Image (spheres, rainbow, N blue to C red):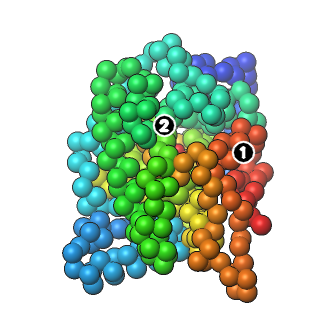
Amino acid sequence: MSSDKDSCSFSIGDTAQEKGLPYVPQRYVVSPSNRSSLNPEKAQVPTIDMARLRQNDDEIRSMAIKELGDICRHGGFFQVVNHGICQSILDEALSVASGFFNLPTEEKMKLSSNDVYKPVRYGTSLKDGVDEVQFWRVFLKHYAYPLDAWIDSWPENPLDYREKMGKYSTEVRKLAMELMRKITKSLGLGPNYLGQKMEDGMQVMAVNCYPPCPEPDIALGLPPHSDYTCLTIVLQNAPGLEILDTNDHGQWKLVPDYRGALQVHIGDHFEVLSNGLCKSVVHRAILNSERTRISIASLHSLGMDDKVGPAEELVDDEQHPKKYKESSFRDFLDFLAANDIGATKISFIESLKL
Ligand code: OGA
Ligand code: NI
């Protein structure tokens, strides 16, 4: 049963999930309405075949772009196949991520921080020791673009971490850029709408580790949230990502795990840019009692201080008034620093609504 007998363990390096406690302390227990099912319904995730999006044949390509646009307007969640990133690059990224989390605590603690502005940081939960409810997660976040600017501050161990994670980061960013161009095209804004701002945009890798949880139905790995990004691409080694299916009365659905496929979702900044035509995807991470789950979320946004507002082309005074105020990645970090996201009182996207 849950217990709070170790409620003194409040800090990174000494949390229940890092120690592998055989019970769930009280401060991880989420409210009954937020608990997950041990046997969740599977999500029907639409598939985007990159081979079709890359077709020379105009007709096939146009059809694929139209399908992508429809998906972005209805759900905003899809999996990508035929993306061209080798399976070995995906496997090795997951493997070095796992290798990092298996290091002794002292080694990982060199990078530990609760400061959300740090470009490289190891942490637990969301902001451990600060937030009201804690989450059964351990993570490493690091900026990844331009790679040369950041790679020297990534973990030194495992010895091949930088090389392998660097390779994946570079490949997945190319894919994200390509998808973002296709999405702005499908919204009628053209493939170069974000132009240089997108080329100079930020990439943050959120490398997540969810150790086995002795009572997976009463705690969560990550609470319901949407990402601040334009686009997020998730690579995982086991199922555990759930999306709130807005096409089915807001049911939580588990994203099935197909080897080689990458999971993509629309973030807050695309919702804003599209003036609400696309909605950012609300998602969470659930737990299991058997194995450690690793996920790598690659988060793509514009530059730190580049403001994203609704595209003028999608705003008119009569039928489509401007629905959101402008914001940047830095504005999101300010929001994250000031708010307890896990308590879900207000989300970043809500704070932007006019
Ligand atoms: C995230 C995230 C999902 C997962 O890091 O923002 O939503 O499955 N991760 O770990
Ligand atoms: Ni997320």
Q: Residue at x 43, y 67 (%)?
A: 192
**Crowding near the residue tagged with mark 1, few <14, some 14–19, many ≥20 C-alpha atoms within 10 Å:** some
Q: Going 70% across and 53% down the picture, which residue do you hit?
A: 348
Location of residue 269 by image quarter: bottom right
Residue 77 position within the rendered picture, expressed as x and y whole percent measured from the top left:
48, 64
**In this view of the protein, can residue 199 be seen by the observer?**
yes
Q: Nearer the viewer, residue 247 or 183?
A: 183
Q: Is residue 235 above or below residue 353?
A: above
User: Residue 335 — which label?
Assistant: 1
Number of callouts in the render? 2
Q: Quadrant of the N terminus?
A: top right
- Give the residue type that dot 2 points to: Tyr
How far across and how far down the image is residue 85, in percent?
A: 26, 51
Taking the spot 40% from the left edge, 56% from the top edge, the residue there is 176
* Front position in the image: 214 or 145: 145
Q: Amino acid at mark 1?
A: Phe
Callout 2: SS: strand
Residue 17 in picture, x, y percent from top left: 56, 28
Q: Residue farthest to the front? A: 196
Q: Earlier in the sequence, mark 2 or mark 1?
A: 2
Q: Which mark is residue 143?
A: 2
Residue 37 showing in the rendered view: no
Residue at the extreme bottom of the image, as rendered: 318
Residue located 37% across and 42% down the image: 169
Q: Which is nearer the eye, 315 or 70? A: 315
Q: Which quarter of the rendered picture does the C terminus lie within?
A: bottom right
Closest to the observer: 90 or 58? 58
Residue 287: mark: none
In whole angstroms, how far apart are the C-alphas of marks 2 and 1? 19 Å
Q: In the current view of this chain or complex, which residue is farthest to the top?
A: 106
Estimate how packed mark 2 is, as few (under 14), some (14 to 19) or many (20 or more) residues with alpha carbons within 10 Å: many
